[in-house]
Amino acid sequence: MDLENEKIGPAYNAPDSYFKESESRLLQRLGIDINSPEASAPKIEGVKPAEVLMKVDTSGVQKRARKQDPLTSKSVGVDKDVDSFGKVEIAPLTFTTNENPEWVNFSAISEETTGLGESLNITKVTYGDLLNPLTESAESESIEAEIVKVETIEPAPIVTETSEFVAVDVVSTIIEHENAIEEVLLEEVVSETEVSEPQEEFAIESIVEEESTSTESIIIHEVPESVGLDELESYISPINAQKAPIVEEVIVEEEPPTINLEAPPTAFAPIAGRQKESATPGWLGIAASLAAIVAAYFIWNAIQPPKVEEAMATELQQDEPTLIESPLDEPNSPKDTIPDGLQLVEPLILGEMPKYKEPNVYSIIDAKEMPPRTKRALQDLEDNGLVTFDMEDEMFEELDFESL
Amino acid sequence: MSVNTANAKNMSETQRLQNLSEDELSVELVSSGVTASLFVEISRRYQQQIYYHCRNLLLSHDDADDAAQNTFIKVWQNANQFKGDSRLRTWVYRIATNESINLIRKRKPTIDFDEAQPEMADMITEDLYLSGDDIALKLQKALCYLPFKQKLVFTLRYFEDLSYEEIALLTSTSEGALKASYHHAVKKLEIYLSVLR
């Protein structure tokens, strides 16, 4: 291929939009406004020190010591350029009192002071309540808070708690209780003994209905299924309306797991207990491992590349002993290639032939070690087309555009 | 009213600069210094050439874009240092070449400019604004097998059509050395292209 005759175009072809965008980016970087033709190249000016607001007396202050870089273990000196920049100027500190009412921390003021909670009727529901609405503690707390709220309104509230309470959030529970309180105000008061009377079928709904008619506030705790009707009364605790609400909690104690305090049968009993004994006899494992080794051997031989026949032939040749063809009694001198009749003339011919001399060719010329006069002479020869030097002669100097 | 007058003045100034030849532009730059309109004219005139020159040396679009941008920033900052001893195009090309060399050294500090960088050939097929010409791409890949100096001389001569005199001024090398280097580069490229085919 002839590159000089067959012109090959460039491999890159950027669109005009790129160049326009590049030009606008360039002008933006330089801050050049095309509409202001009088703009000239910016002069680099030194950084002017700011106006001194307050001088700091640095007398007696110890200068920075050389600090050790933990990574390179080299000491890094003080940056003289930074230090010699000028005096340290610190603006005077001013202190202002908290006179701006917008700075008041509203979160520090209780709702009783602000009264926002009551006026807006906002029910506080925390994120934890939304996540764990079913925990008994959360229920008891919400009920307790409800009791307090109800006590301020009505001296004889009724608070109920259902055992089938599954997935109802706290807010709906509060609304349910408020409805129950309204019903109490309208209905007739029923004594507590009626509530606690044994019935054949214990249903939570019926208890709720009966409780809504009682005069005293009671709390029915969650009743386990194993509790009989005779013990059911103990789960219902009356609440004195005048006293602070107390929520009784009945903790259903489960039987603790029995711990065998006896010594283990062997020293490695915990480990032995976790491991299952293998039903496979030991000799079977040994046989399996041997079979695996044999199989691996055959597989290894199978995947080996076949030896080339030539390589095998050379190996065979190398193994053969070297044969001495010439007999030992004959002289081992090299044969004379000159014909018999011309052997006497040979030294004369060799003597007449000119000795071989290498041409005076210098392939590498080091321009750095060359004297300037020689360099100038070579330059003249090159400029006149008498000699050509390659670029690998270190005459290619470093580019420096300021020299132009 | 005054705004319209200023705009009209700018338009006439822009048109006047567009009609100037390269030598007249150099004289304008030396005599009256650089102005915004003069710089815009210089950047518009050499923007594409400088980008393609940097792209041929750096191969990557992003690097070429950075080098071209830095080139014109230095033109703007050092315009007062232009004495007019060389052509304006040569001066801008020299700055671009320096920027490209600096960028190569920044990317690969241990680079040897006397050695070829064939691993850079992989960058060509995965970048923006390729022409799609197969033989042109092969020539670009073959250029990666040249030492940087030969690649530079070949690129300036073959793609940018700079004369040996300009290249000699740009690279501070004699014209004879440049001709020999270009000749070696062409022969090597022809061999590489025959192999790559």
Image (spheres, coloured by chain):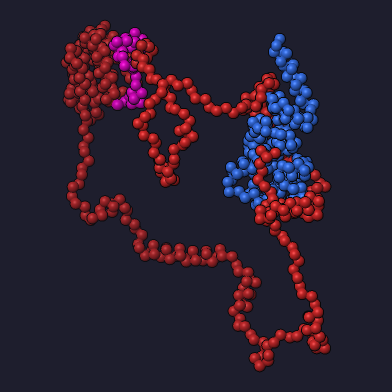
Query: Along the line of sight, which residue is nearer the eye, A324 or A218?
Result: A324
Q: Residue at x 39, y 62 (%)?
A: A285
Q: Residue at x 28, y 52 (%)?
A: A271
To which quarter of the image does residue A108 belong? top left
Q: Give the tally of numbered discs.
A: 0
Query: Along the line of sight, which residue is nearer the eye, A301 or B164?
Result: B164
Q: Is residue A379 visible?
A: yes
To which quarter of the image does residue B99 belong? top right
Is residue A109 a member of the stretch shown in magenta?
Answer: yes
Along the horizontal axis of the image, is B45 left or right of A55?
A: right
**In the image, farthest residue toward the front:** A373
Q: Position of residue A102 (x, y in %)?
A: 38, 12
**In the image, farthest residue toward the bottom:** A329
Q: Over which residues does the magenta segment extend?
A: A106-135
Q: Residue at x 82, y 47 (%)?
A: A5
Along the horizontal axis of the image, is A393 left or right of A276?
A: right
Q: Which chain is red?
A: A
Q: Which chain is blue?
A: B
Q: Residue at x 70, y 33 (%)?
A: B82
Query: In the figure, B65 relative to B105: above or below?
Result: above
Is residue A261 a member of the stretch shown in magenta?
Answer: no
Q: Position of residue B108 (x, y in %)?
A: 59, 45
Q: Is residue A390 visible?
A: no
Query: In the figure, B48 relative to A146: above or below?
Result: below
Q: Position of residue A375 (x, y in %)?
A: 72, 53
Q: Position of residue A388 (x, y in %)?
A: 77, 54
